[in-house]
Image (tube, rainbow, N blue to C red):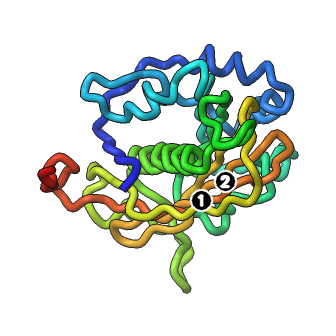
Amino acid sequence: MGSMVDPTDTAVPDLSDQQYAYFNSVPWCARLLSDKRYSTVPSRFGQPSPDTRGDFFTRTLATDNTIVACLYQERRVNGNDERLESGLESNGSTKPQQQDQRISNVEEIRAFLATASGVNGFPGVAHGGFVAAVIDETMGYLIKAHLRASVTEVAPPPGKAKVTMVPLTSSDTTAAVMTGELTIRYKRPVPTGEVLLVRTWVEKIEGRKTYAKAVVEDGEGTVLTEGTSVFIALKHGKTPQTRRVAKI
């Protein structure tokens, strides 16, 4: 399993202002950042936790030679969707959920990443394992946002005029969630030394399972890598710490 999402995590210091300034100096990023439908949100990048939770991204990859800068944004659904009026779509051709197919109150999470040669697999090309880890981490942020949203909107059943509000999962929405499955499709080499955009959204929810999709794109909106994942909410009262640890 990969990412572990615990909605009870304490907040981390918000360093998004300096990250925003970094990406706003890149023309194609500045164009996307001007889309007011998205709001900048704090992330744990570069903010190590005392209990070492998430150290791989908060410490190991948060260096001048790996991930140089990182900025998260979210788009929440509202009653006055201005998708068509704004003329601004997400960077790529793969679209998140449409309003008439709404699954969640959080429509999309996107992460801007600036990388360096420390994540190379080949010269100038990111290691495939690094790309998979970035997708998993961004999806984990998405799932956490959904847990905080508490409820999700689903299409009304036939004959019903009202949108039905149901829990995000069939279990307690404060349960920890872990990656149960992650599938990666490498379509094109992912360059390093450039800014990348990772976008992710929920595809469907079935009981304790949440299915998500993500894409990694370049500045032209070309999809370089796709990922699909299944996140599983642990049963009430269960945490990763209560699982049996194999003795070596």
Above-or-below relation of 173 to 230: above
Residue drawn at point x = 50 percent, y = 50 percent: 136
Label 2 crowd bin: few (<14), some (14–19), many (20+), radius 10 Å: many
Q: Amino acid at mark 1?
A: Gly
Q: Position of residue 73 (x, y in %)?
A: 61, 35
Of residues 205 and 5, which is closer to you in this image?
A: 5
Q: Residues within 10 Å of mark 1 (few under 14, many from 20)?
A: many
For the N terminus, the image quarter is bottom left
Q: Nearer the viewer, residue 143 or 82?
A: 143
| Marks 2 and 1, the one that precedes in the sequence | 2
88 left or right, relative to 217: right
Q: Taking 53 as reference, is 75 left or right?
A: right
Q: Residue at x 55, y 85 (%)?
A: 158
Residue 103 in view, yes or no: no
Q: Quadrant of residue 19?
A: top right
Residue 215 circle label? 2
Q: Is 127 placed above or below 94 here?
A: above
The residue depicted at 46 percent of the width and 33 percent of the height is: 57
Q: Which residue, given by chain and number where applicable, does mark 1 sit on?
A: 227
**What amino acid is found at the position of numbered circle 2 in the picture?**
Val
As rendered, which of 155 and 16 lies closer to the eye? 16
